[in-house]
Amino acid sequence: MRETRKGVDGQLLTASQVQKTTHCLIIGDALKVLPDKKYFADESVNLIVTSPPYGLGKKYGNNFLDRFDLKSWIEMLEIVGKQVWRILKANGSFFLNVSPIPHPKNKEIVPLDSYAYFALKKCNFYLRNKIIWHFNNMQNCVKRLSGRWEAVLWFVKDINDYVFNLDAVRVPYLTNDKRIKGVGRNPTDVWYFDRINNVTKKKLQINHPCVYPDAMIERIVKMSSYPGDLVMDPFVGSGTTMRVAKILNRNSIGVEINPEFEKIIRKRLQMENPWDESSFKVIVYDD
């Protein structure tokens, strides 16, 4: 029987298109794991995609409650940014998802994306794009306009040399005019992907407060890496980055502080055939 599986977009991939990839989950604190060269050598990763906790008071399992203050958050991001710079290859990219959040005391909106920009400039990154992730399925506000977007900041190490596969992420033209030729249009810097709601999370048995939509991570991985590359997420959470990397024939490493999420990540990777237990490794970091 010919071995097949479906990609993120639902198209069938034949066995010749499916590469054997490896996926490693490190259970530990990213602030301790990332500096350890035993796990992350200099310039060893092609693409890093992540969304660190940023003070929304969300409970991530039994072990972690997200209540950073702004000063601590900026300090954390500078530590992570320094290590991400070291780990990334010269033409690599770093995608950081951050959201404007209400201040816990006076509810003033804190533009974390702006703070993130200045924190990562200290680490010598260049901002290639600020992508607006637009969605509709969120709660409505009564004392201000309802928030319907988050930022995805695309940073590169070298502003003149970075992986950018535009043709891999083009989207259909908005018109059926046959005079327009080509494989599609640039997806621009405004992306519409609905958030994963609680009903879907329950159906998929994903007990995690913040789950990326697969399609958004697919666009990032296709755009900024090649099959066989290594993709890393230092705050991997429910494992979407690793799952999409597997589907798209990339290798992956995820770091997660909460050991409860190992079962979720393993299950999500197992959903994608073919599954080879030897391709998935779990390391409990001991400092």
Image (cartoon, helix red, strand yellow):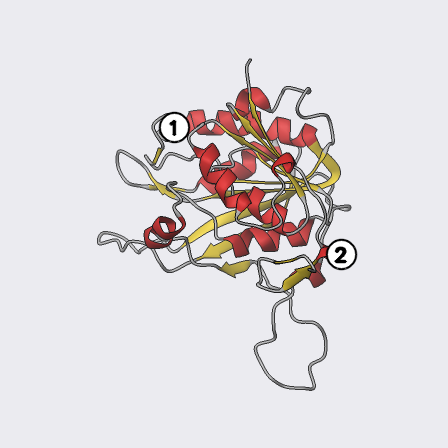
Q: Quadrant of the C terminus?
A: top right
Judged from this view, the residue extending furthest toward the left is 142
Judged from this view, the residue extending furthest toward the bottom is 178
Q: Is residue 7 above or below residue 38?
A: below
Categorize mark 2 by other alpha carbons within 10 Å: few (<14), some (14-19), many (20+).
Answer: few
Which of the 4 image quarters holds residue 61?
top left
In the picture of the structure, the residue carrying the numbered disc 1 is 68
Q: Is residue 108 above or below residue 122?
A: below
Q: Decide if residue 171 is on the left or right side of residue 69.
A: right
Q: Amino acid at mark 2?
A: Ser
> Residue 251: x percent and y percent?
67, 41
Judged from this view, the residue extending furthest toward the top is 287
Q: Decide if residue 20 is on the left or right side of residue 273.
A: right
Give the secondary structure at mark 2. helix
- Name the residue: 28% across, 40% down: 107
Q: Is residue 137 above or below residue 91?
A: below
Categorize mark 1 by other alpha carbons within 10 Å: few (<14), some (14-19), many (20+).
Answer: some
- Name the residue: 52% across, 60% down: 190
Disc nearer the start of the sequence (1/2): 2
In the picture of the structure, the residue carrying the numbered disc 2 is 16
